[in-house]
């Protein structure tokens, strides 16, 4: 009987609800912010300086630990890059356990153990946590620091720097901080191939002794463990560890520009302009403006619904996305608004950025914008609570940043208490309009003149944030011309007479790419026939061929005939040594652009335009006269593809000098791929026939 009564009551309620008029034109009002339950940690302080925070949570049979050394900003100076390599070497095994054995020990228990120059972390199922924690401790206390590991990581770091050498995005990341903070500031300095090349294993050991220490460190343990058991484990692993005491650096305040200025870095091969509007801020997490500033930033550029995105992308189509960010902490940080924009729209995008920054300072956020921003923070914060690593940072953040004990428990209440007036006040305080830097990295020849009409002072810098005087590039080049540079190369490699005698070229090489070893065969026959085959295990992976009239490219069985443009580019050469054609054919246009560093040495930068219109940039070492780098940018499937070849290890073959090592970087669509080719054998004027090009 009760069952039928409940069904009837439910039917009546449904009819009543359907009879009501629902206003679907008005969004429902947000409910009250949820109360966040975060368990307070049990805190221990070890005599060696480690503060241990334990959060007991038995919902899952898992424990996570996070060890953070609070060293503050570190100035590396001429040793820039040493902290990166030192942090990497902490994962290269211990004094009693080689890397392979260490990694195997971690894998066997299904744990995660990570190390860095600022500490480490360990996470595992409860029954394996002691083992994982001990491994992390051993890696921190007694790293192996072998010469072999150092050489490997140093080479990897230099390779990474090389791959980003001509990347506008990477250059922007480096130059923005250098200009904002200054190159001698820990947040403004940067590593280069020169600084990394100069590093030694002893430099790494010195950095370790100075900065990897229990002093000023915070160890947070959260999960299925009792505080008393956690303390015993920490004492066993870290109790006897001692190290150099740390003191936080005292950094002088860096001023913003007196007036807004535009700083331009010319990267001729850039296919987009990297625009960053930036100013320094001093926003501590315990500042009453902290939460209004968070919502002000989201309203301006925190997501796809924000003003910058809607204006620069949706309204004008300047970019795929425009965003902003606002830093906070104990030291100065930055407010930035940035985007990668189409080169022809650079000046228009700058205007749009400044208009939106001005608008967030003068026009209050709408009710809809306010609700969207709050909903975003409510959702992301609540979702983050599911991550033990996120939870682990809360307790130490409270101590490090001098926050009230209930900072995270009341986080959402504080977010939801922010008003439109609060957002406007925060925007006016932290988002500069009149004293900001507008840093633009791109092909300056396409937008510089338009920027000069903006009314803002325009300053020029090179890719390492050094000031450049406009029009002074030619003065940096000694009294030489492109013809002399090419003649110098020809003489250095054997002379025009000997190079002209080369009518056939047959080389075998090995190619290292993404952990694979490939075999490469390249054959050339005068005047301009060439064929290259790349194979692995006897199977042809790639092949390109030009028989002097036509040709094709084949990859994984897919064959594509050369276009008329590609054929025209190959047909312009009449010699196996391109530089001979540069001097013989007046249709080649050569321009000396300046002197650039290539692997630490000065090299002439020569722009080459061939008779078909194809352009490339070649770099000839000032001392040796040899070609050391070549750059080309082409278009494939409507996307720009930049290829950089670094050429080295010249050896005598007969009576001429030829390179035996070529490092290649290919960049397209924001992705970069590196590989290297090493010559194993070269034969000249033998072993090549016309049949090889069929």
Image: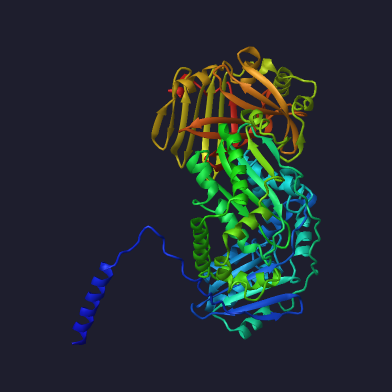
Residue 525 visible in the displayed image: yes
**Quadrant in the rendering for residue 425:** bottom right
Q: Is residue 670 left or right of residue 475?
A: left
Q: Is residue 578 left or right of residue 14?
A: right
- In front here: 79 or 654? 79
- In front here: 75 or 628? 75
Q: Is residue 261 above or below residue 14?
A: above
**Quadrant in the rendering for residue 276:** top right
Residue 320 visible in the displayed image: no
The location of residue 42, given as percent across then percent down, is 64, 82
Q: Is residue 488 above or below residue 382?
A: above
- In front here: 286 or 577? 286
Q: Is residue 564 left or right of residue 228?
A: left
The location of residue 681, given as percent across then percent down, is 59, 32
Which residue occupies 68% across, 36% down?
265
Quadrant location, the C terminus: top left
**Quadrant in the rendering for residue 208:** bottom right
The location of residue 654, given as percent across then percent down, is 66, 24
The location of residue 240, given as percent across then percent down, is 74, 78
Q: Is residue 465 above or below residue 149?
A: above
- In front here: 149 or 454? 454
Quadrant location, the N terminus: bottom left
Q: Is residue 334 above or below residue 225?
A: above
Which residue occupies 48% across, 21% down?
565
């Amino acid at each position: 009987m009760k069952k039928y009564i409940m069904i009837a009551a439910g039917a009546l309620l449904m009819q009543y609800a359907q009879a009501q008029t629902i206003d679907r034109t008005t969004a429902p009002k947000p409910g009250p912010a949820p109360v966040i339950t975060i368990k307070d940690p049990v805190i221990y302080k070890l005599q060696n300086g480690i503060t241990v925070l334990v959060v007991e949570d038995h919902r899952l049979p898992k424990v996570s630990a996070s060890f953070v050394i609070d060293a503050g900003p570190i100035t590396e100076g001429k040793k820039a890059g040493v902290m990166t390599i030192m942090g990497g070497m902490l994962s290269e095994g211990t004094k009693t356990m080689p890397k392979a054995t260490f990694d195997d020990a971690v894998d066997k228990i299904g744990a995660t153990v990570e190390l860095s120059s600022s500490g480490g972390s360990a996470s595992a199922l409860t029954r394996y946590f002691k083992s994982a924690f001990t491994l992390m401790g051993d890696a921190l206390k007694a790293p192996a620091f072998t010469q072999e590991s150092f050489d490997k990581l140093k080479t990897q770091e230099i390779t990474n720097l090389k791959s980003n050498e001509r990347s506008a995005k990477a250059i922007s990341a480096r130059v923005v901080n250098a200009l904002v903070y200054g190159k001698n500031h820990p947040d403004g300095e940067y590593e280069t191939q020169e600084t990394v090349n100069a590093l030694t294993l002893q430099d790494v050991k010195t950095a370790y002794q100075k900065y990897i220490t229990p002093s000023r460190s915070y160890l947070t343990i959260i999960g299925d463990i009792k505080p008393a058991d956690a303390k015993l484990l920490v004492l066993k692993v870290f109790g006897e560890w001692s190290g150099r005491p740390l003191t936080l650096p005292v950094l002088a305040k860096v001023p913003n520009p007196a007036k807004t200025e535009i700083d331009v870095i010319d990267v001729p091969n850039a296919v987009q302009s990297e625009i960053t509007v930036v100013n320094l801020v001093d926003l501590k997490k315990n500042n009453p403006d902290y939460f209004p500033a968070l919502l002000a930033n989201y309203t301006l550029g925190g997501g796809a619904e924000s003003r910058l995105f809607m204006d620069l992308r949706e309204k004008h189509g300047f970019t795929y996305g425009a965003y902003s960010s606002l830093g906070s902490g104990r030291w100065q940080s930055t407010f930035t608004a940035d985007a990668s924009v189409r080169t022809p729209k650079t000046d228009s995008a700058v205007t749009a950025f400044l208009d939106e920054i001005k608008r967030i300072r003068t026009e209050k956020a709408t009710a809809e914008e306010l609700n969207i921003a709050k909903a975003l923070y409510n959702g992301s914060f609540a979702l983050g609570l599911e991550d033990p690593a996120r939870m682990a940072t809360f307790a130490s953040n409270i101590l490090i940043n001098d926050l009230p004990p209930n900072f995270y428990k009341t986080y959402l209440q504080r977010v939801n208490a922010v008003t439109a007036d609060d957002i406007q006040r925060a925007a006016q305080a932290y988002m500069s309009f009149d004293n900001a830097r507008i840093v633009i990295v791109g092909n300056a020849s396409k937008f510089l003149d338009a920027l000069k009409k903006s009314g803002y002072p325009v300053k020029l810098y090179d890719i390492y944030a050094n000031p450049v005087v406009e029009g002074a590039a030619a003065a940096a080049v000694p009294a030489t011309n492109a013809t002399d540079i090419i003649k110098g190369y020809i003489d250095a490699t054997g002379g025009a007479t000997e190079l002209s005698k080369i009518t056939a070229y047959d080389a075998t090489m090995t190619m290292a790419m993404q952990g694979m070893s490939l075999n490469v065969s390249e054959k050339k026959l005068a005047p301009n026939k060439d064929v290259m085959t790349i194979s692995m295990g006897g199977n042809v992976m790639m092949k390109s061929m030009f028989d002097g009239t036509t040709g094709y490219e084949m990859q994984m069985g897919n064959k594509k005939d050369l276009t008329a443009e590609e054929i025209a580019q190959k047909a312009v050469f009449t010699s196996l040594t391109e530089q001979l054609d540069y001097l013989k054919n007046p249709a080649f246009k050569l321009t000396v652009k300046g002197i650039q560093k290539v692997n630490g040495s000065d090299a002439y930068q020569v722009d080459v335009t061939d008779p078909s219109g194809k352009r490339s940039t070649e770099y000839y070492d000032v001392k040796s006269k040899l070609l050391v780098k070549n750059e080309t940018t082409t278009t494939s499937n409507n996307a720009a593809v930049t290829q950089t070849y670094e050429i080295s290890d010249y050896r005598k073959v007969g009576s001429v000098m030829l390179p035996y090592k070529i490092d290649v970087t290919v960049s397209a669509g924001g992705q970069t791929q590196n590989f290297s080719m090493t010559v194993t054998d070269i034969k000249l004027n033998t072993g090549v026939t016309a049949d090889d090009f069929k």
